[in-house]
Amino acid sequence: MMRTHVCTRCQASVGPEQHRCPECNARLGFVPELGMLCAFEDRGEAGWHPLGIGGIGTRLPCGYYGEHPICHWTVPADASDCFCESCRSVARTPRLSKPAQRQRWARFGRARRQLFIGLRQFGLLDAHGRVPGLPEPLFDVVDEASAGMGSTAVQAETPGPILVDLSRIDALSDRDLFQALRRAIGMRLCLARGAAIRPVATAADADRLVAEWEARWAMLDSRSADSAQGKPRMPGAAWRTAGPRALA
């Protein structure tokens, strides 16, 4: 369950993917370091200045902000990369000439951003928004059925980036797509040597660690549901200590 958001300028309720506040018309952008949607004043070349909240400095929209639209995340004004951590994790942008292709790409983006929110809450991202121990890019995409993928929309078993066949995600609900990405990252974390866990010796070890990874995400879903219902949200340090025991 996604947490609720409010405009930091006028306190109106806003959707998690909205680009403008429906009440005060302020620009909206997600700040992944805070895990929240913030209102901004767009000052052109001077960047985006936060409204109603301090301590985050000037921001810039992700390089994909508003395109089609694709992404509503922001990056620090002095960031070395114009793309947010979620968009940067994909090797390439597919063809987007047809409405169906743009819709699939947007769905993949929403699921991917949800994944990165969880990875950050687990403390699994470094200061640059990358997953230590996993090579970049994390994902690559095809936009037509790939014979090598069978009927699978998300393929993590082969070397290289996790492959997402956008032509096959129509058969998945938004939740199923997110869970497929989540399991793929979990498998890579459990199998990657030099990642945050010990090397996996057997297939049974991998199955056990992936099952534990999924159980911890279920805990995160429960916490998010509590937050959406107005219950206290676990602070950041506690999120990290509650993360997967195998990833500690």
Image (cartoon, grey):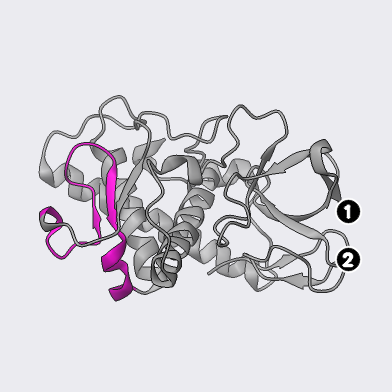
- Look at 83% across and 37% down and name the residue there: 46
**Residue 146, located in which quarter of the rendered image?**
bottom left
Task: Please tell me whether mark 1 sits on a helix, a strand or a loop.
Answer: loop
Residue type at numbered disc 2: Cys
**Which residue occupies the foreground of this view, 176 or 160?**
160
Labels 2 and 1 touching (C-beta < 8 A): yes
* Relative side of 95 to 43, left or right: left
Q: What segment carries the magenta color?
A: 148-172
**Which residue occupies the foreground of this view, 158 or 94?**
94
- Rendered location of residue 94, percent (x, y): 37, 53
Q: Answer few, some or many: residues within 10 Å of disc 2's Cα (few below 14, many 20 plus, some between 14 and 19).
A: some
Task: Provide the residue designation for mark 1.
Answer: 52
Residue type at numbered disc 1: Gly
* Relative side of 130 to 6, left or right: left
Task: Provide the residue designation for mark 2.
Answer: 10
- Rendered location of residue 231, percent (x, y): 68, 67
Residue 159 magenta: yes
On screen, residue 239 above or below 131: below
